[in-house]
Amino acid sequence: MNLDGVSKHLLICNGKTCTKNGAEEVTEAIRGDLKKLDLHNEIHTTKTLCNGQCKHGPIVVLYPQGTWYKEMNKTKIEELILQLKEERKNNLGSELYYHDGKTFKYHDSEM
């Protein structure tokens, strides 16, 4: 696969617990929205196995930004994809971790 032109990568947890909590629907929604908005050549997606945050699933991780999103669903996915398209950085209220340039930090409302 050629990744020329890809600027973002979404890692979509499809581990056992996330799948029970709707990860397949989240995966389909992400990929459908990317295709519908013609962003599938700019934002790559990968289904992963467990990302180790089962109690917060379904988990979606955005790279290179390093933001981990918890409890994702179709509504949150639509907003995330629109933010990525418009290059906005609004808080979804679903952020779990973020990367500060050195390490991952637990996200709180003060960010």
Image (cartoon, rainbow, N blue to C red):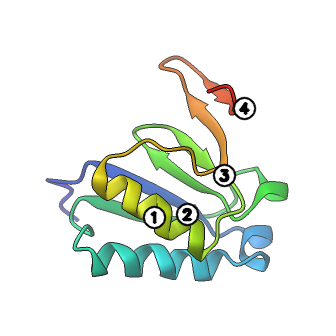
Within 10 Å of the Cα at label 2, are there few (<14), some (14-19), or many (20+) other Cα atoms?
many
What residue do we see at 55% from left, 63% from top? 12
Tell me what residue is drawn at x 15 percent, y 53 percent.
5
Quarter where residue 13 is shown: bottom right
Tell me the element at label 4: loop
Q: Distance between the residues labelled 3 and 2?
A: 14 Å
Work out which residue is located at the far top of the displayed protein and give it: 102
Q: Spatial distance from mark 1 to mark 2, Cα to Cα?
A: 6 Å
Quadrant where the N terminus is found in the figure: bottom left
User: How far across and down, in percent of the image, does residue 93 sit?
Assistant: 66, 49
Name the residue that disc number 2 marks: 12
Does the CB distance between marks 1 and 2 fall below 8 Å? Answer: yes
Mark 2–mark 4 distance (CA, rounded to whole Å): 22 Å
Q: How crowded is mark 3: few (under 14 residues within 10 Å), some or many (20 or more)?
A: some
Which is more N-terminal, label 2 or label 3? 2
Q: Which of 12 and 87 is in front in this view?
A: 87
Numbered disc in front, either 3 or 2: 3
Residue underneath mark 4: 108
> Which residue is found at the position 45% from the left and 57% from the top?
10
Q: What element carries label 1?
A: strand
The mark that comes first in sequence, 4 or 3, is: 3
**Taking 1 as reference, is 102 above or below it?**
above
Q: How many discs appear? A: 4
Q: Which of marks 4 and 1 is nearer the N terminus?
A: 1
Give the residue pinned by disc 1. 46
What is the C-alpha distance between the residues marked 3 and 1? Answer: 20 Å
Which label belongs to residue 94?
Answer: 3
